[in-house]
Amino acid sequence: MIELAILGLLKEQDLHGYELRKRLGELPGVRATVVSFGSLYPALNRLERAGCVKTVEAKTLTGRPAPSSGSLAGELAAFRVRHNLPRPAGRSKKVYGLTPVGESHLVELLTDPQPSDDRTFALKVAFFRHLDPRDRLALLERRRAEIQRRVDETEHRAAGRDRVLDRYVRSLTERDAASLSQDLAWLDGLIASERQAAAPPQENPS
Amino acid sequence: MIELAILGLLKEQDLHGYELRKRLGELPGVRATVVSFGSLYPALNRLERAGCVKTVEAKTLTGRPAPSSGSLAGELAAFRVRHNLPRPAGRSKKVYGLTPVGESHLVELLTDPQPSDDRTFALKVAFFRHLDPRDRLALLERRRAEIQRRVDETEHRAAGRDRVLDRYVRSLTERDAASLSQDLAWLDGLIASERQAAAPPQENPS
DNA sequence: GGTTACATGTAACTAGTTACATGATTAG
DNA sequence: CTAATCATGTAACTAGTTACATGTAACC
């Protein structure tokens, strides 16, 4: 999960750990995607040892490091520089970038055929632009089959039901079914638009 | 999570580990609630040491143990007994039951005010019948506030958005919002019916 | 000059998983 | 007699968490 998140975010832009975490928190993934620093920093070190990421620069905080993250830090630092204020060799900010190994690992993670959990799936979709339409379609269809399997399972259970269900369990079951069918509809929408994109140079072949 | 599941299921009926797992898998909890034996059995032993559950009987498989779980095992075992077939001291099936300590621990877990994750929340609702309407209402309202907080957060992010969003991230965000508002509506339904149940002896107090 | 936000990291812990080991019972 | 299912358990691993430790920079 966390490695996919890191690689996917770095693919777009070089970032340091702290900023990475902030971006991750902004990604919409079925209910909250933030991770703790206690898992983020070790993951970055792991990925560096594995050759997937490398330190691009280890600037002090005054070096205009993170490209406009919406915070004002960069602007204020620039002001400081223009006025020749002291830059007291601050603690370094480690900015990471994706290596070629990291790029191919990202694609591996994104195209890995085994079913992802909800969070990982949401992350994969968030990084869809790094995949070609064929792979996007494959992932969406695997997901659709998985969700459909859950629906069938629930229906099968409902059919073989002998005893009366508790009112609250019934309510949960209905909510589950509603959420599942909403998800199915969402997937169908994405699949349809992917199909359109995957087969665009089709003239009418009559 | 797993301890709540065990206590909640045992509250209704004495069960052994294997059957417990099957029942757990039948509970509707936001996407799949099955647990592995590798976490179930140690959890049962933990709960036994803590005095929350105790072994009710350690029958061999032929003793008509689990009360009609939908399987045919019981019937066939009974047939065996009627015909005086050998009962070769089989490996024991440990049937667990809830102790008073376990009952009060279950209530503690169910009324614990700190926000539950999705799975745990679903489990709590599944065991709602063991709670009085006041506690049910409290849990539902805390949950509603939590979901509303997520909605607000998303909207706040959308408002302060300066750069254009990726098409797929946008789609994820919309799906998230749809799922959140569906959940909110579901909660409102439950809350309304709980309110009605909590204040029934109200004559028109004009 | 103190509080808040930025920034990186480690150690201990949590809550589960998979893979393995073992054996009984049922069904064909 | 053999395969599938029932049944209980352990050991090693996974993927995260919280709490702690440390220090810088910005804000008022």
Image (tube, coloured by chain):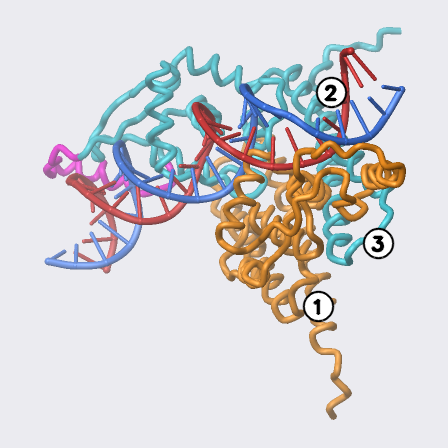
Chain colours: A orange, B cyan, C red, D blue
Query: Is the Cβ of the residue at disc 2 closer than 8 Å to that at disc 1?
Result: no
Kindly report the distance in space between the C-alpha atoms of the residues bearing marks 2 and 3.
46 Å
The picture places residue B68, in percent across and down from the top left corner, at: 36, 35
Q: Mark 3 lies on which chain?
A: B
Residue A160 in the image, given as x and y percentages of width and height: 47, 46
A117 w.r.t. B109: above or below: below
Residue shown at the point (60%, 35%) measured from the top left = A37
Span highlighted in magenta in the image: B69-90
Is A8 placed left or right of B64 in the picture? right
- Label 1 Cα neighbours within 10 Å, binned few <14 / some 14-19 / many ≥20: some
Residue B178, horizontal then vertical, whole percent: 75, 45
Q: Name the residue under label 1.
A: A194
Q: Mark 3 points at which residue?
A: B164
Name the residue carrying label 2.
Answer: B196
- Judge depth for marks 2 and 1 and give the one in front: 1
Judge whether A188 appears above or below B139 on screen: below
Q: Report the amino acid beneath label 3.
A: Val
Q: Is residue B72 magenta?
A: yes
- Callout count: 3
Callout 3: SS: loop
Report crowding for label 3: few under 14, some 14 to 19, many 20 or more residues within 10 A (C-alpha): few
Q: What residue type is labelled 1?
A: Glu
Which numbered disc covers residue B84? none
Q: In this view, does C2 lie to the left or right of A160?
A: right
- The answer to whether residue A19 is seen in the rendering is yes
The residue closer to the viewer here, B166 or A90, is: A90
Q: Which amino acid does label 2 sit on?
A: Gln
Chain where mark 2 sits: B
Which residue is depicted at the point 48% across and 12% down? B104
* Secondary structure category for the residue under label 1: helix
Q: How far apart are marks 2 and 1 (CA)?
A: 47 Å
